[in-house]
Image (cartoon, helix red, strand yellow):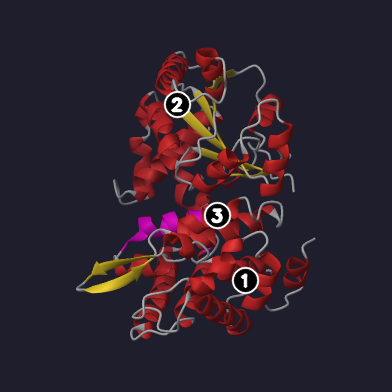
Amino acid sequence: MHALIEQLQQDEPLTFTQGVQHFSDRCPMLLDLQHTEQDPIWHAEGNVAIHTSMVIDATETLLEESSIKRTDEQRLALRLAALFHDIAKPVTTRTEEKDGRMCVLAPKHAKRGRSYLAYRLASLLQPTTYLEVLQLVAHHHAPIQLPIRNKQAPAYHKIARKVDTRSLYMLSMADMLGRTCDDQQTQIDYVHFFQLECENYGYWEPYNPQKDWSGLLEQLTAYPIITQERILMESIWEYERGLYFHPEEAIARSYDKQKECAEVYIMCGPSGSGKSTWIEANHKGKKIISLDRLRELHTGKRADQKHNAHVLHDARESFKQCLRDKQAVIWDATNLRFDFRNVLFDIARQYGAHVTLVVACPRLKTLHKRNKKRTHPIKRSALDRQINSFQWPDLDEAHRMIFIDEKGECLDDTRTRFFPHQAKAPTK
């Protein structure tokens, strides 16, 4: 076990210096935080390293003094999220004129940070802790953004579905306490307002889908599980987009969706992450659309990208035919970027299909080691580009999300949240 993780699991407090010493080999951008400037209006305390150190200290104070009780694993996740919450600022920070002055901005650093951490923290933590750290980092601005934008119940439902709101509140509060700015108290008030709205809408306690969606779930029990799940998730997305005002309205809207549907699996992960092995172990015999195989068919080489347009055209036509035939199909490719995955999901939804996104979460070391042993290895530089371009999928990208480790074992299956008796629990 990692030495610092073991200490933190015993509820030892964390310091920024410890974090850098123990994790900079896995996450070298920690070393760049001290060289990354911040906007003097919002962060008069100085660079990102100074801010992160202050946030960690504030987190320790909150864990010690707050009435919000956290389990040992939740405390561990919160400490690590504090350490890593701004990890991607070194690669996202830029200077831009705004409001009549030159501002220092770091757009999308939260979700970029989640993607950066995904393979660097893999296999280091228990599955629930690992996934919670990633979600806390990605959404740590939500307790400020939701009140500022005057969001209502659907927005709070959406965030509660993705991450523990009490831990998120504590991280955001530490983020506000760990800085020097003129409007610090206003920002703290927004975070307090986030808590009040979570309590008001019933999302301060752990998210319980049976509470909001029991009526719809009862209506769907006679249908196959993939039909139930497709209707439920699409109803949730419609509610969160504001298409209706109460979850019970989803029952009337669900009737046109209650039909047989194709079953689609979209794989996601770099070369050598275990996607094909998982397919072989879990869905042998199903129709597989492999871009590597199609490239080999067109060019004689799996790595030849010259005829990608023809490859993608053939792949999509084959994909659509499977959807028309209601045939179970697996799209086997890296699918590292959201826009690539979203095209497939949009096509599948046009045909009323159920989509499962399978996300492989190996360690970086494992990826490089496996690549050398593959029958068709890729250049190390190409693998590094894949890793650096990866965009961790959010929980809105498919009807079902399965996260697997480097051995192909289940870390998490979102089906268990709504249909606990229909899906395998995480194996660890």
Q: Which residues are magenta?
A: 151-164
Q: Nearer the viewer, mark 3 or mark 1?
A: 3
Q: Residue at x 56, y 71 (%)?
A: 82
Secondary element type, mark 2: loop
Secondary element type, mark 3: helix
Q: In the rendered image of this protein, does residue 314 appear above or below residue 263?
A: above
Q: What's the amino acid at mark 3?
A: Tyr
Can the viewer see residue 207? Answer: no
Q: What's the amino acid at mark 2?
A: Ala
Disc 3 + disc 2, Cβ < 8 Å: no
Residue carrying label 1:
79
Secondary element type, mark 1: helix
In the rendered image, which quarter is residue 422 located in?
Answer: top right
Question: Which x, y percent locates residue 376?
Answer: 66, 26
**Does the stretch in magenta take in 35?**
no
Q: Is residue 409 left or right of residue 333?
A: right
* Quarter of the image with the N terminus in it: bottom right
Disc 2 from disc 1: Cα separation: 40 Å
Residue carrying label 2:
353
Q: Nearer the viewer, mark 3 or mark 2?
A: 3
Residue carrying label 3:
116
Q: Residue furthest left?
A: 100
